[in-house]
Image (spheres, rainbow, N blue to C red):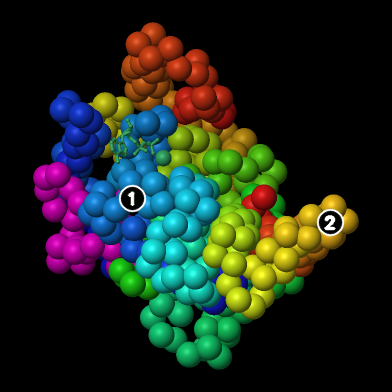
Amino acid sequence: MSVTLDHVSKKFSHNGSSINVLEDLNFTIEEGEFICLVGPSGCGKSTLINLIAGLERPSAGRLLIDGVPAAGPGRDRVVVFQEAALFPWLTVRHNVEFGLKMLGVPAEERQAKSAEYLKMVHLSRFANFYPHQLSGGMKQRVAIARALAMDPKILLMDEPFAALDAQTRHLLHEELLEIWQETHKTIFFVTHNVREATVLGDKVLTISARPGRIKRGYAIHLPRPRRESDPHLIVIQQRILVGLQEEIAKVVKDEDMDYLVKKSHPVDSPDRGVGSSL
Amino acid sequence: MLIGFAGVFILGIGAGFLLGHYRWLDELFGTLAMALHAMPGAAWVPLAILLFGLNEAAVIFTILLGATGIVMVNTSSGIKEAPVLLIRAARTMGARGTQIFWHVVVPSAIPRIVDGLRLAWAFGWRALMAGELMIGSMRGMGEVLNRVAKARDLYQILAFMAIIAVISLAVDHFVFRRLESFIRLRWGTA
Ligand SMILES: Nc1ncnc2c1ncn2[C@@H]1O[C@H](COP(=O)(O)OP(=O)(O)O)[C@@H](O)[C@H]1O
Ligand SMILES: [Mg+2]
């Protein structure tokens, strides 16, 4: 399945004034690709994921799935959110089976599926746990298993590992790559972390801030698994960072202005900048 | 009492679902629900007597109006506060309208609903006392209450009060505390 954005823009209106969050996006995600999109926090990455997922509608332009305009959300495009978004009242297993249950899949088949995907994310032993009994990394694994159980054509990942510590994130990168190689899913992965993007993607797209436009694409042909410290990778990371530097400055400046106006929390997210996680 | 509480349960949760789900209903009746919830149960006794006379029906009416409001308000706010993120997650997995309501919105509101029921128990119990005392139905608690009151015997009055407190606490402890700890276990919330 391919996803094409054809002159897609998204505006939000805020009591009278409107902000152009995304402006004139044109790109295609080809079947089987692993694309990472990097940009500073607040540049519209989640908005873009929601557009592709069909949770939001573009203000202008079209979203094409295999050349056909998309109407609303579909099981072919499942999202893994940053906050895992598991249902706290369901066990791990029932979380994974949720979508299948909504589809009316019989219980035995559901159970077989959830067992299969929980095994894939190494959580078979935790099938009967509740989400609050799991660590952050385990929750994200459940969210990935839950998405895979829907057998989507494309996996949309919205900074799924941003809240995890470095070791856990590294482990999950490896697992995600294994899953990708095993299932041949198309993956669209959004992050503010340049290193993460270069370790994972075939292609890294950078997005500018206010308005969000695709700035550049970088193809990464290095074999996997990649080491974050691989000199070739560091060269690419540096090029991406330099390209993004002005965007980060733009966001920080905007937020400082917001701060002066609202006198709100001076720092609400320590790692909002793209570069700080390097 | 049981009939009254069952009524509170059904009416309160039902109305709460409706108010929580349909915004126009909430705009129409939301303030009414708040007013109902703010009114002390005993305040309904005169109206109950007027409508039903001095009997059980009047007592049930008093309990119903004294305790339904809190269940309604809690249920509807639980419904309204269902996390958007969970609803979105369900939508990307193909869940639609009624499925989302029953499988996402309602379960996420359950801790609030149980909170409401627990408060309703306390409110309903008070409304029951007020109702029984003033209406004094032939059999049951009203009779005992009036007898105790007329006897002017301090020990009888204190004993009666102790019994009331024990029953109230016992239900709170054995029903609601258990329900709450179960919920804490399941939902991982306080
Ligand atoms: N529903 C919405 N209504 C109004 N503004 C929104 C809404 N969603 C996002 N925005 C704005 O769009 C911008 C981009 O948000 P988002 O897509 O969450 O960025 P990112 O995921 O890159 O951090 C932000 O400035 C945010 O305030
Ligand atoms: Mg985001």
Percent position of residue A126, x then y = 71, 68
Disc 2 versus disc 1: nearer the observer: 2
On the image, numbered disc 2 is attached to which residue?
B153
On the image, numbered disc 1 is attached to which residue?
B32
Q: Is residue B46 left or right of residue A213?
A: right
Image: A209 above or below B7: above
Residue at image position (58%, 41%) is A163
Percent position of residue A257, x then y = 35, 11
Ligand 2 location (quadrant): top left
Does A97 appear in magenta?
no
Q: CA distance from mark 2 to mark 1?
A: 43 Å
B150 or A106, nearer to the observer:
B150
Percent position of residue B10, x then y = 46, 72
The stretch in magenta equals A49-78
SS category of the residue bearing label 2: loop
Image: B141 above or below A165: below
Is tag 2's residue or tag 1's residue first in the polypeptide sequence?
1
Residue B180, image quadrant: bottom right
Q: Is residue A1 left or right of residue A197?
A: left
Q: Which chain is mark 1 on? A: B
Residue at image position (36%, 43%) is A46
Q: Amino acid at mark 1?
A: Leu
